[in-house]
Image (cartoon, rainbow, N blue to C red):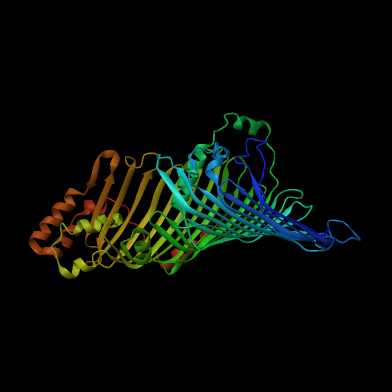
Amino acid sequence: MKQILLENIELKIKPFHRTIYHDPIIKEIKLSYESFLESYASINLDYGKTNISLNGNAGISPDKLDLESLFFEAELIVNNLPLYEYAYYLKGFPSISVGSSNLNLKIKSKKEKDQMNLANNVECKINSIGYTNKENISKRFPLITLLGNINYPLLSKKAKTQNLQLTIPGLLHLKLDSDLDFTYHPVIRAIVSSSFIHISPILDLVNALSNSKEKNSNSAEESKTGEKKPEVFVDLKYSANYISYDTINLYNFYANAQLKNTALNYTAGLRKLADGYLLLSGEADLRSGISTSAYLEIENVNLEKITKQILKKKFAEGTLSTYVKLQTDNKYGEKDFLKNLTLSGYSQMKDGVLLEKADILYPIRFLNKIIPSDDKLNTNISRFNSIDIDFNLKNQRFKVKNLDMQGKIFNTNGTADIGLENPSEDISANLIVSTRIAGAGLKIPLVYSKSNYVPLTIDKVWLASVYTGMTVGGPLGAMIGSVLSEEARSAFKTIRNKTQEQFDENKKRLLLE
């Protein structure tokens, strides 16, 4: 007998377990055998609204009759499996809804003779998966697609993925090439790339899933008593052509990370950020909390392009460069990340203008109210040659140690101090505005202190002198009047001007520290 063929039959299998939702109806069975090297089998059945077919051919060496000499090709096809009939499997995730959801699956598996590798080509499509977010709003993904290859070396604890792609239209696209080895302890090497990813809806989904899971109140105590040192190695390389978050659009993002047990080293950045670039690098210790040190560098970013890109409107012109060193020691996993955060940095903006809503220029815009209007003066009043800012953050206080603006018309120097626990109330700033037209002539001291409920104070002697001079001699008289006010000139400490060499020196200092 070389072949058995059963056609036009109905073989019903009555339920023997509650997970068998329908009566499977076998429609066709084919079995054929020529020799050990040539055999074939196929089965076609209906399961409710679902059709399932399995077919393949196999052979084995009659001399060896072992796994290594076995070879086969098989294909499993599942069409129109209604996931909503098995929603009770998702009872741990009550926010997930699979109403009207269907799954289509195709798996092609192959093992060649004298090889111990099982190659699987996977095509999986799920339509209409929904969830309910924290705001109790129902949302739905029209289609989820998983395509790619998964290779499994038989009798091993290893796996390999090639060109495995996960796509959710309008949400994300991920491509994964990885090597997984669990022989002794987890070793994961992965290269991940995406053509697009939208972060806001992903966070919305993650929050919905996290709220679905019941938290074990004893988990914290168990982790303390039975805490084991993790043994894992992860080498991850990730790149994304396009990332969207709220109103922010980023392009050409990359990240490289190596995790050895609890020690993490990472590098991330944007290769092209409005004509410049962004680089973040550092290291972290993930034992029972996060301890990290990092260095952030932003170089030659076009302010017009970046404000249009992020804020959807031009708020500035010129270029921006920033260097920041960050360190935090949050050993106990406290929720207040800022509590143990220290930060120091230096920024410079060159050859530009800060437009409306740029609060740093409030003192300069204020001058428009006390100096007679002049077309040429007004067109240049907010333009600058450079703005240098030194800042640091420690013990939940953010301090601008020095603000030095060299404007086309006005210069501004000053400091600021903000308490992050209550920034709306705990804030103060001292500024001195001078004009380039009359050299050291016009000096306007501005003091802002929320704690004293005084939004803006100007030395009264200075203001009287300026007003008197202005009424007599216009703008030039106002500048002369300012010179006569020693009270205003001595009210604040003179701040030295920074040069480009000092800017570079700050950058070197941050790198050395």
Q: In the depicted view, which residue is nearer to us: 55 or 217?
A: 55
Of the 4 image quadrants, the one containing the N terminus is: bottom right
Please name the residue shown 63% across and 35% down the image: 18
Q: In the depicted view, which residue is nearer to us: 146 or 439?
A: 146
| Residue 195 shown left or right of residue 74 in the figure | left
Please name the residue shown 58% across and 31% down the image: 216
Residue 448 visible? The answer is yes
Occupied quadrant, residue 213: top right
Please name the residue shown 69% across and 41% down the image: 229
> Looking at the picture, how far across and down is residue 29, in whole percent?
71, 53
> Looking at the picture, how far across and down is residue 195, in whole percent?
51, 63
> Looking at the picture, how far across and down is residue 73, in whole percent?
73, 61
Residue 318 visible? The answer is no
| Residue 252 shown left or right of residue 123 in the figure | left
Tally of numbered discs: 0
Q: Residue furthest front?
A: 8
Q: Residue furthest right?
A: 63
Of the 4 image quadrants, the one containing the C terminus is: bottom right
Vertical arrangement, residue 72 with respect to residue 11, above or below: below
> Looking at the picture, how far across and down is residue 3, in whole percent?
79, 59
| Residue 52 shown left or right of residue 353 in the figure | right
